[in-house]
Image: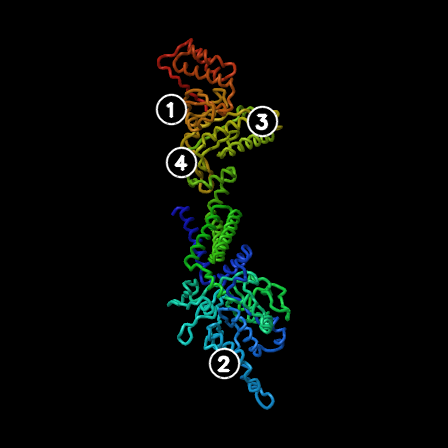
Amino acid sequence: MRRSTRDRLVIAAIALVCAAASVSPAARPIRGLSLDILTALRWEVFGRKQDPAASPAVVVAMDEESLRTAPFKGAPMLTWTGEIGRVLSATLEGGAKVAGFDVVIPNSLEQSEIPLGDGMLGEKVRGFDRDFLRALAGAAAKGKVVLGEVLGDRPILPSPGQRIAVRQNIRPLNDHADSDDIVRRLPLSFTINGAKVPTMAVELASRALGAAPEFDERGRLTLAGYRVPGRVPNTMTLNFEGGADDIPTFSFADLRACAVKNDKEYFRRWFDGKVVIFGTVLDIEDRRMTSKRFATGIEGARSPRCTAESMPVTARSRTSTIAGVYIHATAVNNLIARNGVVEPGPLPRLLIAALIAALAAAAAWLFRPVVAFAAWTGMIVAGVAGATVAFNYALALPIVEPFLASLTALAATIGYRFVIADKDRRLLQKSFALYLAPHVINRMLSSSKLPELGGETRNVTVFFSDIEGFSLIAEKMSPDGLMELMNEYLSAMTDVIESHGGYVDKYIGDSIVAVFGAPADDPDHAANAARAALDCCTQLAELNASSAVFRDCKLAQRIGINSGEALVGNFGSRRRFNYSVMSDAVNLASRLEGANKFYGTTVIASETTVALAGQGFVWRELDAIRVKGRTQALKIYQLLALSAGLAPQQQTVIANYADGLAHWRAREFARAAECFGRSADIDRPASLFAARAQELAQNPPGEDWDPIRTLQEK
């Protein structure tokens, strides 16, 4: 299997495993966190979606204010029944569609067996609950009241008199807590004595809508044509608003005072068409943690008051819990407004997590860790923003699962790169660090074709340079001075070569052997070698002019360039090897460097290099030669300048030389000598050819004369 295929499969496997782990049962305790975060973000970003006054459900709160206000102060709720009946009747007369009780009063004072005087307390207060029971019975006759019960091993039921008064219109108040004990969903029904019974919220919403609830065999609810969504069977995911005043809340003490003074207008203004839920709203009793826990606000906000006979009690700090009555009120609102939260099932959650994890793994594979982390952060921020917008339309896209899956995939992929995938890259970086420029190493590593250990054939350009008269220079200088001179010269030339993508194969005394096109692929290796040759000449001129080391010794160099197939790779023994290049192209580059000595030039290239380098350079054809060790003739060219840097005088010299060379090959030696002679004073190759042409003009060669010069020197 190819390394690239293996890496792709590993990255895909990392993404899938991380995504599967994020949606597995092990991650269930934190799965609901997505709902909590989205509820808070929607509240912070979009604020309140609707005016609380438009809420279908309202709450009548037995609150701290009621406990501190006469006649309830110091009295148990068991004694409140008459006043509860008074307020119930007032709200229904004000136009409320239905009233439900989230508070259960399981006993009656009339049933008390506590001794009092010569009898029992219950006997002494016989008829105490009469007004309350009449209010319940009257409301039940119109189908406008529902009492609550708590199911369990020991059910909590209303007192027998209440059950009779409401004609058994009693519905369960049980809620549904996730494994982290947070309420995010509400059951839709329970099976009691073999019959499916809707919960309090469903019963209240169905009576307000005038439509009976319909349950299918899987427990899914349809109410007035609305199919209630629910990821957990037989539950509805609650769509909580943020803040503390999303459900209009009325203090029971204030409503009781309002009912006593018979302010019917107040009850019509605030309760007409509403679903009224009676419940406790206290600091410590019946408090529940819900998906609204990060967006609860400071409790105490209340609807406009009817009287000034009591003082409202306002919480001073924000709390993460809400009173249980608000859970049922929210459910009623969701059912009537048809905006229960839609949660994707396991497969969509897995696919979303896998997609985000795959993107994170790809970023970790393609970029450096810091850049990959920044890209992952941006992706998560964008994803959360999109999920927040979707949640504004009641669609709860997962954010915790993709976050965990992508973060794990990011870390795992970085670890895989470091431990396994990049091990070969680090080995290559370490191997080439001493003889390759950093940017060349990076390009080699990013190349689709890395060098094969042991050697491979590539089309390359070989660069060979030498210092003119180095032996004489070495004789005149001290060893330390020579070392300093050569170090500065070789360092400067190496920098130029590497800046154009080449690498220095070796130093042979004063000679430099460099290769372009390996180990990294370089389709412009010939052009880059030519540019490097011109820049080396410029750099040496600057050293001769400005360097203190070159003050007493001015250097001149000769450069040969040739392109062709070469074997590149690691050569040597089993214990020691070197990355190098071998082929006839290398030998020919060396011969071309030596040809400069004969022609008096600085840079000579083969016709192969000239053809590959393109149109960006000014070349002059010097001659056709045979070099030592080769029988095949080749044309050689002198590199003069970049196309844009040619001086007019050089153009004239080139034209005269080209005319002379054409006459030379046509055996028109006199005319060739004339053409060469026009530039002989300023051009060494022209001077050389002018002398040769004059000699042959005076002594014409035989018919077998060959216009190809054989160079015997290296």
Residue under pointer 1: 632
Report, in whole angstroms, how far the alpha carbon at label 2 lies from the one at label 4: 101 Å
Q: Residue furthest bottom?
A: 118
Q: Amino acid at mark 4?
A: Thr
Residue 404 seen in the figure: no
Asked if the residues shown at circle 4 and circle 1 are in contact, with their CB atoms under 8 angstroms apart, the answer is no
Q: Secondary structure at mark 2?
A: helix
* Pointer 1 with pointer 2, Cβ within 8 A: no
On residue 26, the disc is: none
Q: Residue at x 41, y 9 (%)?
A: 699
* Residue 502: x %, y % from top left: 49, 34
Q: Amino acid at mark 1?
A: Gln
Between marks 1 and 2 in the image, the one whose residue lies nearer the viewer: 2
List the residue tagged with mark 4: 457
As measured in the structure, the alpha-carbon distance from the residue carrying label 3 to the one carrying label 1 is 39 Å
Q: Position of residue 434 (x, y in %)?
A: 52, 39
Give the alpha-carbon distance from disc 4 to disc 3, as whole Å: 37 Å
What residue did someone put label 3 on? 542
Q: Could you say which is closer to the camera, residue 181 or residue 301?
A: 301
Mark 3 and mark 2 lie on one chain; the one further toward the N terminus is 2
Q: Are marks 3 and 2 in contact (CB under 8 Å)?
A: no
- Which of discs 4 and 3 lies nearer the camera? The answer is 3
For label 1, the crowd category at 10 Å Cα-Cα, with few meaning under 14, some 14 to 19 and many 20 or more, is few
The first of marks 4 and 1 along the sequence is 4
Report if the CB atoms under discs 3 and 1 are less than 8 Å apart.
Answer: no
What separation in Å lies between label 1 and label 2 (alpha carbons)? 122 Å
User: Which of disc 1 and disc 3 is earlier in sequence?
Assistant: 3
Left or right of 298: which side holds 276? left
Amino acid, disc 3: Glu
x and y, in percent, of residue 123 in the image: 55, 87
